[in-house]
Image (cartoon, rainbow, N blue to C red):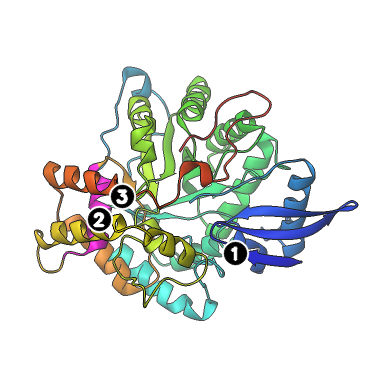
Amino acid sequence: MKIDVSLFAIAVVVPVGAFVVPVAVPHRVIPLALHSTVDDNEDGRYSRRSFVNHVVTATAAGTVSTLSMGSKPAVAASSTTSDLAGQIELPPMGLGAWAWGDSLFWGYDKKNDDVLKDVFDYAINNSKSSTTLLDTAELYGLGRSEELIGKFSKDYDQSKIQVATKFAPLPIRTRASDVVKACKKSVQRLGRPIDLYQIHFPNVWSNAEYWDGLAMAFDKGLVKAVGVSNYGVDATRACHDALEKRGIQLATNQIQMSLLYRWPEQNGLLQACDDLGVQVLSYSPLALGMLTGKYSKQNPPQGPRKALYEQLLTTPDYENLLATMKGVASSHGDEATLSQVALNWARAKKTIPIPGARTLSQIQKNNEALNWNMSPEEVALLDREAAKVGTFIQPGANPFPKKDLNTGLRMYDS
């Protein structure tokens, strides 16, 4: 196996019949193939061979599957929505646990689990809400992230903790029962029911079957609410309508959203979610660390993120945005940081940011974003400066399936 690490994908060269096929595996899958691992066995783990087989099978079928990655949103409670089951109240900010198990993109090492436990403890014990939201997925470390959350949460009042996790719609998983089966394994790793269960990303087919699977998991009491991730306008509406027929509310859509990635606001996705009463979770609100101000030409990020950072530096617009963010931060006290500015911008857009944290310092600074809010004038100023930056990820660069091949439904647009 030859592995070529690029910004968003690994090219895994594998034999398929008589051919040698390069498989584009997006960055949130990268660590999974290299980490010991979720096989369809009783303990809920994958083997490395099983994962590669998933990828090879998808390629042979001509498909590419992919993963993602304020004030509380004002959920429009229409008379229809208010009667649906599966409503969920979420805190104004969550904690993303992608890095808790991801060895390649984030450099996870199990010897640092004690530090992650400290981060978890701080998040629970210093919550500014009645609950603490943790976001994970079966593919984060191939179950490792879920296992850590389950282990860390054992000694806590479970009513104080909300866990959101995700089903990976690999192309060979095409039935509603596949969603339920995977959900049960996530429950096993977490050691508790799931508060919010999400479809991680669109597939090239069988998307409607997944929505039935969400409803089945809900009806069986495995999950308290259901959502999607990386869904576009049309797909969000279609999933909402399908669940509504089962008497269930589509609770959330988890999408990439940050000062450097504003497409969901520009193409109507945020408005569509608001119209449907679907809460938006914004992942990568710190733009993979590019909005923290911690990097420089002399100290760039390492790994796949380095190329992205270098691309941002090709024009002065990125550094001008950071300078504007510093100005906003300075008006909110000496302790306000660029990260807090980025998080409060996401909150001002009526989304729930879910920044990751691997150290106590990171979780402490992130939590302090909830101590202040941004003015409309500051939001407008940041919007203007952010609009000038054209060197970050563009929607077309994200390899999510754009349409369901069977139905023609547009699945992804931002």
Cα separation, mark 3 vs mark 1, equals 26 Å
Q: Report the amino acid beneath label 2.
A: Leu
**Tag nearer the camera, 2 or 3:** 2
Q: Is residue 393 above or below residue 263?
A: below
Residue furthest bottom in the image: 111
Cα separation, mark 1 vs mark 2, equals 31 Å
Which span is picked out in magenta? 336-348
Answer whether residue 269 is magenta in the image: no
Q: Report the amino acid beneath label 3.
A: Leu
**Residue 166 at what x, y percent from top left?**
53, 48
Q: Which circle's residue, 2 or 3, is located before the other in the chain?
A: 3
98 vs 340, left or right, is right
Q: Which circle's residue, 3 or 1, is located before the other in the chain?
A: 1
Residue furthest right in the image: 18
Mark 3 nearby-residue class (10 Å; few <14, some 14–19, many ≥20):
many
Q: Which circle's residue, 1 or 2, is located before the other in the chain?
A: 1
Is there CB contact under 8 Å for labels 2 and 3? yes
326 vs 356, left or right, is left
**Tag nearer the camera, 3 or 1:** 3
- Residue at numbered disc 2: 321
Q: Report the amino acid beneath label 1.
A: Pro
- Residue at numbered disc 1: 31
Point 32% across, 18% down: residue: 79
Q: Quadrant of residue 253?
A: top left
Judging from the image, what secondary structure is the residue with disc 3 in? loop
Res. 388 mark = none
Point 14% across, 47% down: residue: 378
Cα separation, mark 2 vs mark 3, equals 9 Å
Magenta stretch: dominant SS?
A: helix
The quadrant in which the N terminus is found is bottom right
- Residue at numbered disc 3: 259
